[in-house]
Image (tube, helix red, strand yellow):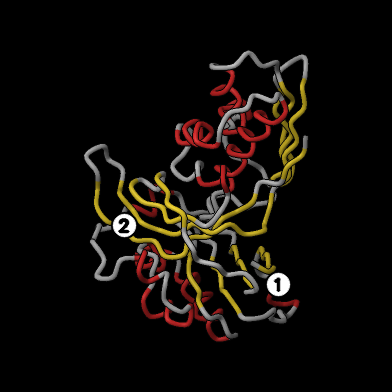
């Protein structure tokens, strides 16, 4: 069974308050995009995990795809599997790539062995893996809140728009991103901002991580300015990572010299 775990972007990200458990309450809108990994899951005599493409930090036996397998294995008598992941999505980029791989593993195992686990229960497994992992079970635009693991459907629709994602080979850890954050309740709630015309988002919607991360990596702010200079309707950093994206009315032409500087994905939303 082959699937294609996709990335997501954050449309806005407000860090509301620090929780008693040490995490933060946030609000954001997660939106799926077409940049994808490749995941294959097959029945096997022994449990195996292998990867290719971008090197994944840490030990292979600790990969989130295996964690997903073991979570289901606790509740269902399933045989070993061979998991092969070709990693295309950059790591530490704010795109949710690892969470997507884990979520698609849950979905794949459910389908492969006809376990008939509901989406609601798959989301419960996913929440044990990571805060944004549950989003990828339904993989539709969602307003997220609390730790980023509670979701409501969002009517935001960017169909027909064009997106340019730029990863400048900078890895930003979650701990590094939160280090300079002072949680603040926003003047305008994201649920209301997202209803406004996309041409107004530039003036109303923000990612709270940008202020501190741009100080550490000024080149990210320069990329954001560049995206606006070439016609982006809205541009932002995604999540706590370093991927910058611009949303456009139509495809833009990039010079080869520009493409050579960054890891880039572009396509329709």
Foreground residue among 257 and 228: 228
Up-down: is 233 above or below 245?
below
Q: Measure the C-alpha gap from mark 1 to mark 2.
A: 33 Å
Q: Residue 71 — which label?
A: none
Q: Which residue is mark 1?
A: 259
Quadrant occupied by the N terminus: top right
Foreground residue among 142 and 173: 142
Residue visible at 54% across and 33% down in the picture: 122
Up-down: is 194 above or below 103?
below
Mark 2 element type: strand
Q: Going by the image, does 162 lie left or right of 182? A: right
The tally of labels here is 2
Q: Going by the image, does 217 lie left or right of 103? A: left
Front of the two marks 1 and 2: 2
Residue visible at 45% across and 36% down in the picture: 127
Q: Position of residue 146 (x, y in %)?
A: 33, 47
Q: Going by the image, does 3 lie left or right of 91? A: right
Q: Position of residue 196 (x, y in %)?
A: 41, 76
Q: Which residue is mark 2?
A: 15
Q: Position of residue 99 (x, y in %)?
A: 55, 42
Residue visible at 55% across and 37% down in the picture: 119
Foreground residue among 6 and 210: 6
């Amino acid at each position: 069974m082959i699937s294609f775990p996709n990335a997501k972007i954050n449309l806005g990200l407000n860090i509301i308050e620090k929780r008693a458990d040490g995490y933060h309450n946030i609000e954001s809108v997660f939106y799926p995009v077409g940049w994808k990994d490749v995941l294959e899951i097959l029945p096997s005599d022994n449990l195996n995990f292998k990867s290719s493409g971008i090197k994944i930090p840490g030990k292979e036996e600790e990969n989130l795809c295996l964690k997903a397998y073991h979570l289901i294995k606790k509740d269902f008598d399933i045989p070993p599997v061979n998991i092969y992941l070709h990693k295309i999505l950059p790591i530490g980029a704010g795109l949710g790539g690892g969470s997507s791989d884990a979520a698609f593993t849950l979905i794949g195992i459910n389908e492969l062995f006809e376990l008939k686990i509901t989406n609601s229960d798959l989301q419960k497994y996913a929440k044990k893996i990571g805060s944004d992992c549950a989003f990828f079970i339904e993989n539709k635009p969602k307003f997220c809140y609390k730790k980023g693991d509670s979701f409501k459907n969002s009517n935001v629709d960017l169909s027909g728009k064009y997106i340019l994602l730029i990863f400048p080979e900078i890895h930003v850890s979650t701990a590094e991103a939160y280090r300079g954050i002072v949680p603040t309740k926003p003047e305008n709630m994201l649920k209301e901002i997202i209803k406004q015309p996309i041409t107004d988002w530039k003036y109303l919607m923000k990612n709270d991580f940008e202020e501190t991360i741009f100080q550490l990596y000024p080149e990210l702010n320069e990329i954001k300015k560049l995206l606006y200079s070439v016609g982006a309707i809205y541009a932002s950093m995604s999540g706590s990572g370093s991927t910058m994206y611009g949303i456009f009315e139509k495809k833009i032409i990039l010079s080869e010299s520009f493409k050579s500087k960054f890891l880039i994905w572009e396509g329709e939303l």
